[in-house]
Image (spheres, rainbow, N blue to C red):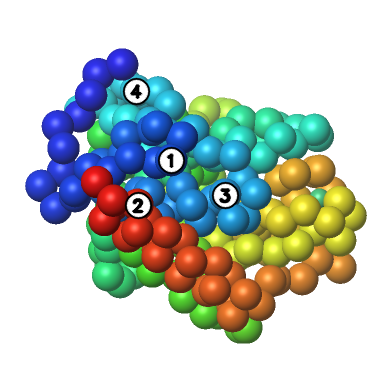
């Protein structure tokens, strides 16, 4: 696999399992995913595009029921960047779209902070493709819709999942879409996030 040059603003560090990461921020996310029980793979593939692109993570939710529309049997692509506001999130998404990557499913962008929305925890943004068809059944336009990524506990399987889009509580672990699902409180997710940050800092300090 082709290795990207180290980021100028990132100090490389090593996960306890031996995976070398480009920054403490990436290591923070790895610990955070583990706290949420979401299996991650670091820099899993190189996607074709102009220029090409290596996603920071894939998340595999072990969904047993696939949804062709959302492609939930596929891994979720995760892009991690230190972004400060909505405009920077949008600019990052635009940058990825303009590369015309070989990736037509949703992806997730995470940053250096999580935030509260309606009592729940937003941990980043989803960007999902929405295709507009022309009258003769050709792809007229491909739009990318963004939405908050909110952590919730599935009432069907009891596992922790992440909301697919603005209106869907479809569980990525078991495939059930239940209206009984509830967002995990911001305080609980924030505590996991702070713990992940502290662990990353501690790991970096040991090197
Ligand atoms: Zn479930």
Secondary element type, mark 2: helix
Q: Residue furthest top?
A: 1
Question: Label 3's element?
Answer: helix
Q: Nearer the viewer, residue 178 or 40?
A: 40
Which of discs 2 and 4 lies nearer the camera? The answer is: 2
Q: Secondary structure at mark 4?
A: loop
Answer left or right for 166 relative to 204.
right
Which mark is drawn over residue 34?
Answer: 3
First along the sequence among labels 4 and 1: 1
Label 3 Cα crowd, 10 Å radius (few <14 / some 14-19 / many 20+): some
Q: Residue at x 16, y 43 (%)?
A: 7
Instruction: Give the CA distance from mark 4 to mark 3.
Output: 23 Å
Above or below: residue 33 compared with residue 104: below
| Mark 4 burial class by Cα count in 10 Å: few <14, some 14-19, many 20+ | some
- For marks 4 and 3, the one nearer the N-term is 3
Residue 3 in which image quadrant: top left
Viewed as shown, does residue 60 lie left or right of 26? right
Q: Quadrant of the N terminus?
A: top left
Residue at 83%, 56% (x, y): give it: 158
**Front label number (2 vs 3):** 2
- Residue 100 vs 118, above or below: the answer is above
Residue 201 in view: yes
Residue indicated by mark 2: 203
* Element class at badge 1: loop
Q: Are the residues at dot 2 and dot 1 in contact (C-beta closer than 8 Å)?
A: yes
- Residue labelled with disc 1: 16
Distance, label 2 to label 4, CA atoms, is 27 Å
- Residue assigned mark 4: 46
């Amino acid at each position: 696999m082709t290795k990207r040059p180290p980021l100028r603003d990132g100090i490389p560090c090593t996960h306890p399992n031996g995976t070398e990461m480009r920054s403490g921020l990436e290591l923070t996310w790895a610990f955070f995913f583990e706290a949420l029980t979401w299996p991650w793979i670091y820099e899993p593939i190189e996607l074709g595009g102009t220029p090409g692109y290596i996603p920071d993570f894939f998340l595999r939710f072990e969904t047993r029921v696939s949804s062709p529309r959302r492609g939930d049997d596929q891994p979720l692509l995760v892009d991690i960047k230190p972004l400060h506001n909505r405009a920077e999130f949008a600019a990052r998404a635009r940058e990825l779209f303009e590369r015309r990557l070989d990736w037509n499913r949703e992806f997730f962008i995470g940053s250096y902070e999580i935030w509260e929305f309606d009592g729940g925890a937003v941990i980043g943004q989803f960007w999902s493709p929405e295709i507009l068809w022309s009258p003769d059944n050709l792809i007229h336009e491909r739009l990318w819709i963004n939405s908050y990524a909110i952590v919730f506990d599935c009432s069907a399987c009891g596992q922790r999942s992440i909301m697919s889009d603005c209106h869907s509580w479809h569980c990525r672990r078991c495939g059930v879409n239940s209206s009984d699902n509830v967002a995990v409180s911001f305080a609980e997710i924030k505590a996991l996030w702070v713990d992940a940050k502290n662990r990353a800092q501690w790991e970096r300090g040991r090197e």
